[in-house]
């Protein structure tokens, strides 16, 4: 199971307050983290990605992009544009 799927699974098991603590810990370990509008985007070092939004009233959603699909996504949408530039330096 990739890291994004593991994070999503952990978030399903906790409330929003505990979920934010889990996200903060994941943010520290992440390859890249950014907030785009109301969504937190976390790219893990295995290439998987979580897109997390809070919907209010204790509801949090997490979309998972597997490493095999991330290149397809990045052809159209580039939320992690600084990753390759930083790693190249």
Image (cartoon, rainbow, N blue to C red):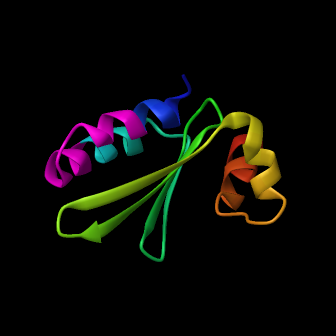
82 on left or right of 55: right
- Going 75% across and 43% down the picture, which residue do you hit? 69
Q: Is residue 59 left or right of residue 50?
A: left
Residue 14 placement, left or right of 75? left
Q: Residue at position x 17%, y 45% from top?
A: 18
Is residue 28 toward the left or the right of residue 5 in the image? Answer: left
Along the line of sight, the residue nearer the viewer: 52 or 89: 52
Residue at 49%, 40% (x, y): give it. 30
The residue closer to the viewer here, 75 or 45, is 75
Q: How many marks on residues?
A: 0
Residue 3: in magenta span = no
Indicate whether 53 appears above or below 19: below
Q: Which residues are magenta?
A: 8-21
Which image quarter holds the N terminus?
A: top right
Give the quarter of the figure containing the C terminus. Answer: top right
**Vertical arrangement, residue 36 with respect to residue 69, above or below:** below
User: Camera-side residue: 66 or 36?
Assistant: 66
Residue 60 image position (x, y, % from top left): 31, 58
Residue in the image at 42% along x and 73% along y: 38
- Is residue 32 at all visible to an observer of this figure? yes
Magenta part, dominant SS = helix
């Amino acid at each position: 199971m990739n890291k994004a799927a593991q994070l999503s699974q952990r978030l399903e098991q906790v409330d929003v307050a505990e979920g934010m603590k889990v996200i903060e810990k994941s943010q520290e370990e992440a390859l890249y983290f950014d907030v785009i509008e109301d969504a937190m985007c976390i790219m893990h070092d295995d290439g998987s990605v979580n897109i997390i939004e809070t919907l209010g009233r204790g509801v949090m959603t997490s979309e998972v992009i597997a490493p095999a699909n991330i290149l397809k996504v990045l052809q159209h949408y580039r939320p992690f544009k600084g990753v390759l530039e930083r790693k190249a330096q």
